[in-house]
Image (tube, rainbow, N blue to C red):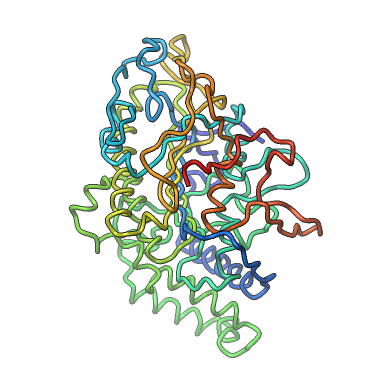
Amino acid sequence: MSAEYNADGGRPGAGGAGEHMTRRDALKRGACGAAGLMLAGRTSEGAIVSSIQEKAKSIIQIWLWGGPPHTDTFDPKPAAGYDYCGPLTKTIATNAGSQIGELMVESAKVADKYTIIRSMTHGNNGHETAAYMVQTGWQPGGRVVYPHVGAIVSKLKGYEVGYKGLIPPYVVLTQPQGRFSESGYLGPKYKPFATGGDPGKQPFAVEGVIAEGVSDKRQKERRELLHNISTFGQAMKDDPRFVTLAESEDQAYDLILGDGAKVFDLRTEKDELRDRYGRNTFGQSCLVARRLVEKGVKFITINYQGWDTHKQHFEIMRRKLPEMDKGFATLISDLSERGLLDSTIVWMGGEFGRSPRVSWEPPWNGGRQHFGACFSHVIAGGGFKGGMVVGSSNATGEEVKDRPVYPWDLISTMFRLQGIDPKRELQHPQGFAVKLCPSKDDGVKSGGMLTEII
């Protein structure tokens, strides 16, 4: 795996934020993706009824791409001194009695609704390998390429078991990471639907296809013209062999011009609420995620870039933390106020934390480095208790002090709350069975499922 990435964590030429997609590309991807999803529904292996009670109907993953600083956010260490805290030397009391970083003002007000895990660990400091571990629940290497949690949820809770939503069951706002195959051995049918575009700029729809100067009427006329002059277009209308492809095209266009597109149009929301979320890409992505949950979408990932702060760490944190704090806290409050939090897991974290000891020396001049030995995640809703803290780190935040939580521990617990047996096996295309998640029985280090907060 290559280690060459842009400053914001994106990889050049691999689906990063700077990659341009045309309107035609977006429509083509939408049609192909919809076709795959529909075909998946027609080739169902059949659902296995689980005795595990389902509490969570949806998951919103807030992926802090690059690795957020645990000691500046949810595990502050003010007594560690300047070499660890830099200028962020204060903490703020939450409404649940815990202490979090001084810039997390809004999150402190809703801490009774989420739980902080301060003892996440895996010991890996590489972006690609750590991201793979945290989002699949498996160690990298070996003959199996494991899928993202969202792809598993898409398979077991999506079209194959009767999902009828207009929006695909697994959505990414707005760009895929490009660091590993989200669908893994499950294949391209289970890749996420990535919206592209920028929810902070309205009108917003799939890859910005509501383009300036092109009305809905003109889009429809273009489609009709294409069908009239295309032999293949006529065949799609008249030949029953093309019925699935025609349905897929209809679904793709619905995401642009039909009811499916309406979920992405934030102009229908009150200005006051949009302001609460924050008029920026992340804040408005959180608002779109809430709307997707209302439409029954099973798994939504918000890829929130910019956390790989090797240099100018504290300057960046003074910009990013208030933005993250506002969007996250408002999402939690908004879901709760609408009666959706009890059935929606909100999972926030990155591939690792940042080094508690600040790198003051050149060329970093006040940066934090990759740190997989100990870091924090936050979990809320969908059957998880709020107002709690799981585990702890030592006085400097560099080591897990008690109750280690490994990625597979957390993922297994989320599966259970979705009514999915984490010990269940799926069939690999090469004919052998693959477990959803490893456990101590598979020889991995494990702190066990998070039964204390469910």
Q: At which x and y percent is residue 153?
A: 56, 58
Q: Indicate the quadrant where residue 449 lies.
A: top right
Q: At which x and y percent is residue 237?
A: 55, 87
Is 382 on the left-hand or right-hand side of 192? left
Q: Measuring 27% from the left and 27% from the top, which residue is drawn there?
A: 92
Q: At which x and y percent is residue 181?
A: 63, 49
**Viewer-proximal residue among 64 and 363:** 64
**Viewer-proximal residue among 196 and 376:** 376
- Quadrant (top left, top right, bottom left, bottom right) of the N terminus: top right
Q: Indicate the quadrant where residue 202 lies.
A: bottom left
Q: Measuring 46% from the left and 14% from the top, which residue is drawn there?
A: 357
Asked if 359 appears above or below 375 in the picture, the reply is: above
Is 57 on the left-hand or right-hand side of 73? right
Asked if 140 appears above or below 29 in the picture, the reply is: above
Is 275 on the left-hand or right-hand side of 225? left
Q: Residue furthest right?
A: 431
Q: At which x and y percent is residue 396?
A: 46, 16
